[in-house]
Amino acid sequence: MPFVERVFSGVQPTGNLHLGNYLGAIVNFVKMQETHNCIYCVVDMHAITQGVDVWGGPAELARNTREVTAAFIAAGIDPRKHIVFNQSQVSGHAELAWIFNCVARMGWLGRMTQFKEKAGKDRENASVGLFDYPVLMAADILLYRATHVPVGEDQKQHLELSRDIAQKFNNDFGDSIRAQGANDGLFFPLPEPLITGPATRVMSLRDGTKKMSKSDASDNSRINLTDDADTIAQKIRKAKTDPEPLPSEEKGLEARPEADNLVGIFAALAERSKAEVLREFGGGQFSSFKNALAELCVTKLAPIAGEMKRLVSDPGHIDSILNDGSDRARALAQETMNLSKDIVGFIRRR
Ligand code: TRP
């Protein structure tokens, strides 16, 4: 029996959601709602894997958790038809992560580039949680036996690790899984990343070779989802460009990272291809393209910022959405946890 298709994805509440998070992940979350049952999680347990100086402490974490929830809803995620919740409210994430800790291998985790980047030179001083981060991520996805995971380009390696963990679990416990009658010995699906759209990697507005990032010192390098219309337009007008006019074909964007980035952002927001955008703007001056891009950004993003502001002003309402989503997520998770415990041989109350 094939697995029922289900979508799961998560966003960390670590502050400053920006255009990169929006185009790289959240727009795809919104789209997947049309065809799949979706679960969207604010991964607050992942958020605390770096030092408290990095994630900002308890008040900041709670504020950011509500803000990401607000962004989901403002962007068009329907928390009644689908599930929106915060990770720490469903204990199955941590429980399944423990089982997976005993399936995953040190060597697999040691190869994760995100860990190497985030830990930097001083690995002795990185938290165990930061090293283990990808195992918790595998548990997030597989707790719901999700089959499809919309993510940004940078999460590809973590998805591969999730597949490796699912496969090794299915393998290690194959006999037990068959004895439970589960899916021909395949208990966990091998989840697939969905990385789509012309702007899966949005670059800094100040340097087209660097990713747009919440931690860049210059606020002008990114468009925050909370920026108002004037700020958005100003940042686009100030964005770095080169002196050439825009090319008429995509090939002309090679070796022009800033131009490529801005055309990609236009294409993604307008839901057109880069080729189409260049057919309209190629040969023209950068300034007129920038005006059109600023207008498009404001039209698409300013209403989201406005709606987020309205939503976060009523934290009680946001919390009730998270509570309701957590209740529904917990019910689904319980089923996987019970079966997983049986498969491993943990005795449970019946
Ligand atoms: N690691 C992801 C990121 O930083 C966030 C995340 C945590 C996630 N758990 C997940 C994404 C499960 C997809 C599925 O973007």
Image (cartoon, helix red, strand yellow):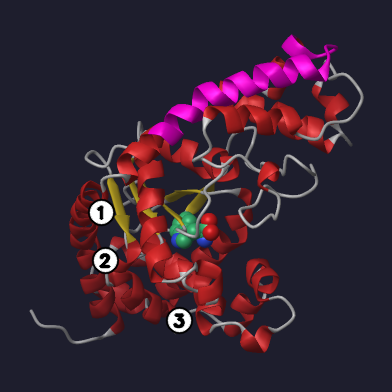
Task: Report the Cα–Cα distance between label 2 and label 3.
Answer: 20 Å
Q: Amino acid at mark 2?
A: Gln
Q: Ligand 1 within 8 A of label 1's CB? A: no
What is the total number of numbered labels drawn onto the structure image?
3
Q: Is residue 50 visible?
A: no
Q: Which residue is mark 2?
A: 89
Q: Which residues are magenta?
A: 280-306
Q: Are marks 3 and 1 in contact (CB under 8 Å)?
A: no
In the displayed structure, 44 sits above or below 267; it is: below
User: What is the chief secondary structure element of the magenta stretch?
Assistant: helix
User: Mark 1 packing: few (<14 Cα in 10 Å), some, or many (20+)?
Assistant: many
Q: Mark on residue 101?
A: 3
Q: Quadrant of the C terminus?
A: bottom left
Image quadrant in which you'd find residue 307: top left
Q: Are marks 2 and 1 in contact (CB under 8 Å)?
A: yes
| In-image side of 75 versus 115 (left or right) | left
User: Which of the two residues, 167 or 283, is positioned nearer the viewer here?
Assistant: 283
Q: Position of residue 18 (x, y in %)?
A: 56, 44
Q: Which residue is mark 1?
A: 322
Q: Amino acid at mark 1?
A: Leu
